[in-house]
Image (spheres, rainbow, N blue to C red):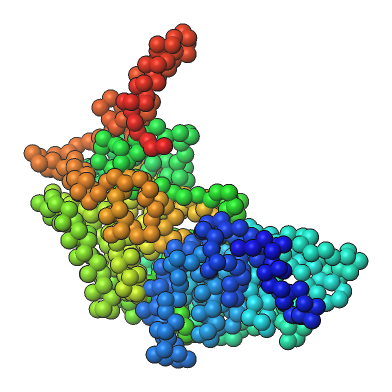
């Protein structure tokens, strides 16, 4: 809250010649993502920070949920006096400081706590020391990284140090002088230094730790710091014995789906169209990547559309802006990872082998066989419960949808009390008499319900859905708490397309692998746009904003999500779900839907969804331009402004 020139008059003791200190930690920057206030002024208790923690919402939500399983031999019953650990209204730096302090108070060293919160890029580093890698993997079973561009300086009085994020997206440089002074800052030249007095100078490297030990009076090398920590316990043995890889318990023979007569009906009920297959699903398998389109989207926003839209369409991805650099997910692939440990977490405050007892998933998109392996788990001390997320067709009131959501939340919480390790939220019971709740609605509601009850970290959430098929859908589900997703209808639809000659004659297993690989690339690209490197950090981080959803939906299902434009409430949502279900299962003949519709989501079609550019607007604009016809121009302008309002300013 002060400019540098105001600091000394405000603290007159700093001007006293007899005032000496062995360290000084100064933060002189402006607030970029919170409103500046005295309680957010830096340095904090243990650190100061230049950058953004992009995964803050997920970090804060999960640390709150971990309070429910936290136990401390040191604090015992008084541990609750330290809660809440995180302050929701604090800044990203303030919350980072809170968690850092909590880890130190409960027995971890400053250096180990920093290594847990800002780990190196270890997943794809094949030359990393195996014991160090095991420490990072063990730590990942207890806490996700705090990800984003960051240069963090920390001290407890005995040590002072600094660390960069795993990408090195913030600068930090240091000088060591001949009179035993160390000056480290984000820029060179913060203090005048005689070049002849410089003994050594350098810069921090991504993921590496800079540390000074005042008791020993020396700079401690990064490898020495970390070797002491990763050799303190048998992390390599613990992870090898405790972590179970999904591929190790999955049947290697991929069973082909049984193509049923109601495939088109189910596709319609979940909002599939001809364009879904043509522009979204088939290119993923053919090209092994998220399909690309030209710039500009003239289709109506979901809240202004004439057609019933999926709730996924009401969300827009956030992306890195101004001081927040993005990542190149292709060229910087080595620092990115989709690997996650899922299932019940251990006690964050203990160092026990069983804390690492979790299921390793290398891709959040799982095949039918992988889902079956989780579904039939009855070993390793784990078991799974499937929860139906459909409700009776006769229920047409919003109370019925809300009752279904409440039922799912209660069943999920009860599953935890009954000792289940995983729940599968499934819409497979969709049919003529059953309407499916949106998988996103169910997933996010359960995720936040369990966070409020401090039980989220005690169970893994797997989604079995016919609704999700696009990269955007999968990103939303993961961003709102899903641990793994089985898009079974996408697999069935693609296999039918292969049978119809729309895909090469590849096996079902090859087709599933191609889809998973294409979606994985798309998820990495979306994460990279926000400067996030690991799926574990992206999970639950809610890097989205809603456009056109009413507060009653946001508060119930998506708390913490910005929705600056009101609109669709539960009454409208229930109606849209019912309309979409009737497309697949018409009242007059529910078993006779032969073809998918083509509503023109991407290209204008007569009778389809409206677009900013249609034959009339294009014709009038061309006449105005070619013939210099003012009347045609004003006809175009008036038509575009008053007849086709499809977006918001």
Locate the N terminus and report the quarter of the image it occupies: bottom right
Front-most of 278 and 443?
443
From the viewer's perspective, is 643 left or right of 131?
left
Q: Position of residue 319 (x, y in %)?
A: 50, 49
Q: Position of residue 232 (x, y in %)?
A: 59, 86
Locate the C terminus and report the quarter of the image it occupies: top left
Say whether residue 244 is visible.
no
Rendered residue at 45%/41% (across/down)? 291
Say whether residue 80 is visible.
yes
- Above or below residue 50? Residue 524 is above
From the viewer's perspective, is 227 left or right of 299?
right
Q: Within the image, what quadrant is residue 57 found in?
A: bottom left
Q: Within the image, what quadrant is residue 46 found in?
A: bottom right
User: Residue lying furthest left in this view?
Assistant: 588
Q: Position of residue 485 (x, y in %)?
A: 35, 58
- Above or below residue 204? Residue 647 is above
Q: Position of residue 526 (x, y in %)?
A: 48, 51
From the viewer's perspective, is 119 left or right of 546?
right
> Exactly how many numbered labels are in the figure?
0
Q: Within the image, what quadrant is residue 387 found in?
A: bottom left
Front-most of 174 and 352?
174
- Above or below residue 90? Residue 218 is below
Rendered residue at 73%/83% (across/down)? 214
Rendered residue at 40%/13% (across/down)? 632
From the viewer's perspective, is 29 left or right of 218?
left
Rendered residue at 68%/83% (across/down)? 158
């Amino acid at each position: 809250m002060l400019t540098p020139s105001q600091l000394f008059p405000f603290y007159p003791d700093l001007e006293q010649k007899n005032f000496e200190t062995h360290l000084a930690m100064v933060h002189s920057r402006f607030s970029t993502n919170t409103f500046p206030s005295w309680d957010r002024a830096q340095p904090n208790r243990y650190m100061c920070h230049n950058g953004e923690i992009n995964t803050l919402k997920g970090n804060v939500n999960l640390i709150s949920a971990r309070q429910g399983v936290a136990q401390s031999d040191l604090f015992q019953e008084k541990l609750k006096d330290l809660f809440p650990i995180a302050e929701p209204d604090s800044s990203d730096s303030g919350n980072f400081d809170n968690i850092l302090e909590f880890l130190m108070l409960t027995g971890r060293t400053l250096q180990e706590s920093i290594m847990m919160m800002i780990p190196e890029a270890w997943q794809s580093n094949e030359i990393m020391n195996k014991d160090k890698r095991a420490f990072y993997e063990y730590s990942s079973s207890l806490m996700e990284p705090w990800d984003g561009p960051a240069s963090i300086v920390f001290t407890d009085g005995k040590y002072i140090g600094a660390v960069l994020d795993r990408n090195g997206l913030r600068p930090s440089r240091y000088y060591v002088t001949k009179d035993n002074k160390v000056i480290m800052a984000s820029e060179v030249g913060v203090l005048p230094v005689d070049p002849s007095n410089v003994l050594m100078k350098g810069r921090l490297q991504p993921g590496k730790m800079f540390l000074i030990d005042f008791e020993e009076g020396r700079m401690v090398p990064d490898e020495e710091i970390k070797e002491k920590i990763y050799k303190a316990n048998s992390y390599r043995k613990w992870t090898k014995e405790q972590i179970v890889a999904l591929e190790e318990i999955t049947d290697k023979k991929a069973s082909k789906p049984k193509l049923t007569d109601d495939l088109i009906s189910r596709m319609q009920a979940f909002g599939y169209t001809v364009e879904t297959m043509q522009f979204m699903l088939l290119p993923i398998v053919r090209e092994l990547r998220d399909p690309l389109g030209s710039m500009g989207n003239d289709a109506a926003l979901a809240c202004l559309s004439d057609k019933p839209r999926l709730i996924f369409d009401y969300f827009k991805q956030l992306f890195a802006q101004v001081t927040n650099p993005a990542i190149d997910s292709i060229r910087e692939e080595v620092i990115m990872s989709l690997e996650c440990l899922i299932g019940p977490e251990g006690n964050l405050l203990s160092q026990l082998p069983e804390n690492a007892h979790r299921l390793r998933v290398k891709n959040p998109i799982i095949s039918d066989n992988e889902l079956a392996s989780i579904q039939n788990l009855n070993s390793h001390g784990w078991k799974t419960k499937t929860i139906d997320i459909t409700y009776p067709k006769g229920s047409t009131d919003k109370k019925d949808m809300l009752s279904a959501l409440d039922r799912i939340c209660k069943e999920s919480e009860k599953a935890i009390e009954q000792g289940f390790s995983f729940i599968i939220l499934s819409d497979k019971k969709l049919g003529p008499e059953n309407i499916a709740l949106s998988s996103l609605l169910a997933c996010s509601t359960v995720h936040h319900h369990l966070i409020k009850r401090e039980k989220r970290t005690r169970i893994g959430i797997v989604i079995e859905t016919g609704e999700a098929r696009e990269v955007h859908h999968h990103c939303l589900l993961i961003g709102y708490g899903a641990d793994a997703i089985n898009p079974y209808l996408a697999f069935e639809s693609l296999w039918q397309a292969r049978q119809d000659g729309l895909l090469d004659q590849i096996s079902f297993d090859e087709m599933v692998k191609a889809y998973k690989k294409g979606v994985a690339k798309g998820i990495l690209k979306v994460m990279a746009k926000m400067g996030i490197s690991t799926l574990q950090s992206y999970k639950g981080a809610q890097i989205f904003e809603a456009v056109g959803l009413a507060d009653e939906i946001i508060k119930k299902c998506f708390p913490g999500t910005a929705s600056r434009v009101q609109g669709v409430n539960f009454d409208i949502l229930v109606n849209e779900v019912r309309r979409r279900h009737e497309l697949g299962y018409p009242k007059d003949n529910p078993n006779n839907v032969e073809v998918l519709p083509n509503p023109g989501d991407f290209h204008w079609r007569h009778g389809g969804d409206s677009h900013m550019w249609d034959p009339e607007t294009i014709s009038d604009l061309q006449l105005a331009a070619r013939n210099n016809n003012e009347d045609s121009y004003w006809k175009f302008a008036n038509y575009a402004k008053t007849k086709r309002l499809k977006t918001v300013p």
